[in-house]
Image: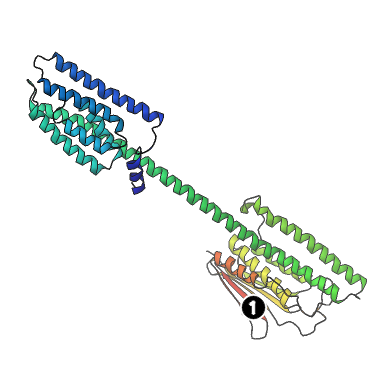
Amino acid sequence: MNASATATLATRGAGTRRRPRDWVVDTLLFLAAVVFALLVIGGRLESSTPPPTWLFTADVIAGAVGCAGLWLRRRWPVGLALVLVVFSTFSETVSGALVVGMLTVAIHRPPRTTAAVFVLSVVAALMYVVLRPEPGIPAWLLFMIGLAVQSAAVGWGLFIHFRRQLVLSLRDRANRAETEAQLRAEQAQQRARDEIAREMHDVLGHRLSLLSVHAGALEFRPDAPAEEVARAAKVIRENAHQALQDLREVIGVLRAPVGELPQPTLADVQQLVAESGRAGMRVTLREETSGPAPDLTGRTAYRVVQEALTNARKHAPGAEVRVHLAGSAGTGLRVEVRNDAPPPAAGLTAGPVPDPGLARPSGPAPDPGAGQGLAGLAERVALASGRLEHGPTAEGGWCLSAWLPWPA
């Protein structure tokens, strides 16, 4: 049980308006105490040995005050119980009100306070059997009856107390769990947004870099033959159409679970390399893998190669690019993409250009998002429990390599 639940129980009913249910309960308890007091008074009046008049009068007054005080039991339960304990040392009619008072203390106050009041009530019961012995009834039996009734009231009150405390604790836990669930949902949404951003960068960056290459070639060679211009325009149109298709697939994550979306695999790297080759890149693939890689490993390897080819196309136009995939189950997958230094010729592409055959511009346009792709790629590799390394080579080129786990 937590402290907040105990504090809530301790302050419940203090200074707050009674609900209809509270009025019903208080009225019933008040009437029960009054009926008990009236029965005791009637029994004493019919007794063959009535108590002295002054004692009977004091008993009745104490009983009336005790019953009326029950309307204050929610605001001052301990104070009322102590007054009733004092009255119970000589008054018999206050016994019903005392039981209600003990029950209230046990419900609304900590067990330590309840125990202290209960001990005082036991002492008061001893004083009563000494001050007012009943003819024909042993004092110990009278004391045990009073002790049993008070113990039952305290026990029932403690049961209600701990039950309410448990309910409050469970409610508090439920509220905390709901808050934590909401936070987890917000974090999941943020992760989904980050994933969409990475997918859009990886997919569209690759397509748009192809468009940039061919559009730049058209700008640099406005006097190119009509056949070459038509071929370049066709490549631009096809890649623009494919970029739209890729964008629809990426945005589809907002409408469908990620598992239902088409995801690239390690086998798709061949198609990626072939597509870059058709766009005019001098790229070769050497694959030394055994069997299909796991989904996460294959998808991450595909994104590594895709980002490396995109960067090579933007920052080293005309350079030769070599893609190397090697690994097996149990040893991991090594992905390496290495490109040479771009050729010094500013106007023409090095080697044959199968698609447009147009010369390229002398250098890539400034990219406002430069560096963001590698940062996102490093995060993607880290999420796959892999390692990413990149940097310039001694020959003036660039190398991007990653190691990804491949469980046995």
Residue 274 position, x and y percent, is: 74, 68
Using residue 67 as the reference point, say whether residue 15 is left or right of it.
right
Q: Position of residue 173 (x, y in %)?
A: 42, 46
Quarter of the image for residue 143 reads top left
| Residue 270 visible in this rendered orientation of the protein | yes
Q: Under tag 1, what secondary structure?
A: strand
Q: Nearer the viewer, residue 372 or 312?
A: 372
Residue 111 image-quadrant placement: top left
Instruction: Check the image and report above or below for 128 versus 356.
Output: above
Residue at numbered disc 1: 399
Camera sees residue 2: no
- In depth, the one of 243 and 123 nearer the eye is 123
The image quadrant of residue 163 is top left
**Residue at the location (65% across, 61% down)?**
197
* Image location of residue 136, percent across then percent down: 7, 20
Amino acid type at circle 1 is Cys
Residue sitting nearer the eye, 11 or 313: 11
- Which residue does the image show at 16% across and 16% down from the upper left? 43
User: How many residues crowd around disc 1 within 10 Å: few (fewer than 14), some, or many (20 or more)?
Assistant: some
Which residue occupies 64% across, 86% down? 394
Q: Is residue 89 left or right of residue 97?
A: left
Q: How many marks?
A: 1
How far across and how far down the image is residue 250, in percent? Answer: 68, 57
Residue drawn 77% across and 60% down? 242
Question: What colouring does the structure picture have?
Answer: rainbow
In the image: residue 54, left or right of residue 71 = left
Q: Is residue 154 left or right of residue 164?
A: left
